[in-house]
Amino acid sequence: MDERRRVLLVEDEKNIALLLAHNLNSAGYETVIAYDGEEGLKKALTEKFDIVLLDIMLPKLDGFKVLEGIRTRSDVPVIMVTARDDDKDKIAGLENGADDYVTKPYKLQELIARIRANIRRSRDEMITHLAEGGGTTTVRGLEIDRGRYVVRKDGNELELSKKEYDLLLFLMENAGKPFSREELLGKVWGYDGFLGDVNTVDVTVSRLRKKLEKDPSNPEYLITKRGVGYYIQ
Ligand code: CA
């Protein structure tokens, strides 16, 4: 039997935190609560967790600062919790290395499904990474070195976030074949069905284009297939 997955819940509203921890524990997780940003960051860096649920509005250190601190040392999946349906928060979180976001008020079942998807995704990556070892994939001067998580274009290394890297790797390994945004949510983000928000894919594509393309509005690599989705040519 699997050991219980550990969740770090960084949430300053005690009632919400205690209720959610109770529900997560009933769903089979072991939940640790941190009530402010400093405590959250310290716990994230000193203990082992399978996933972090990170509120944005927090005392002492806000969620973005906590995320930044976590990402200097750890690849643990992080789900940001935004108070409003605010695209600025989502984009900032995704740019800073969040794996996902949910908007309050969220449905418990949806949150648990996302926790499960993100943990599974991160474990699959680790296993794939170990199995694949090194090797490079190249498309016209664009090169991914899988063993070292490095992407170069014409010899220059690109700074990609984890999801930008994952998306690019998936599309390059399937070069020429278009995938719908829903398919990409499944393959790259680990969502089944219609759980995720396809906007996540568009945001990540647009970030990637800014880094990859000479002219992001007229892309040469990451192409939109009208009515279908995206592909690498
Ligand atoms: Ca809060």
Image (spheres, rainbow, N blue to C red):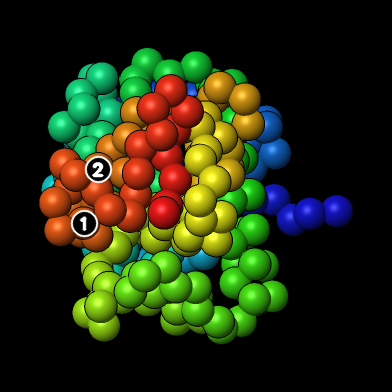
In the displayed structure image, the side of residue 86 where residue 1 appears, left or right: right
- Up-down: is 197 above or below 118? above
Task: Of the two numbered discs 1 and 2 on the same chain, state the one appearing first in sequence.
Answer: 2
The residue at 37%/16% (across/down) is 105
Q: Nearer the viewer, residue 125 or 20?
A: 125
Q: Tell me if I can see residue 33 in this picture.
A: no
In the displayed structure image, the side of residue 145 where residue 112 appears, left or right: right
The residue at 44%/45% (across/down) is 231
CA gap between label 1 and label 2 equals 10 Å
The dot on residue 35 is none
The secondary element bearing badge 1 is classed as loop
Q: Residues within 10 Å of mark 2 (few under 14, many from 20)?
A: some
Estimate the x, y position of residue 6 in percent, counting from the top left. Answer: 58, 52
Disc 1: which residue: 213
Disc 2: which residue: 206
Quadrant location of residue 89?
A: top left
Quadrant location of residue 36?
A: top left
Q: Nearer the viewer, residue 31 or 5?
A: 5
Q: Tell me if I can see residue 128 in this picture.
A: yes
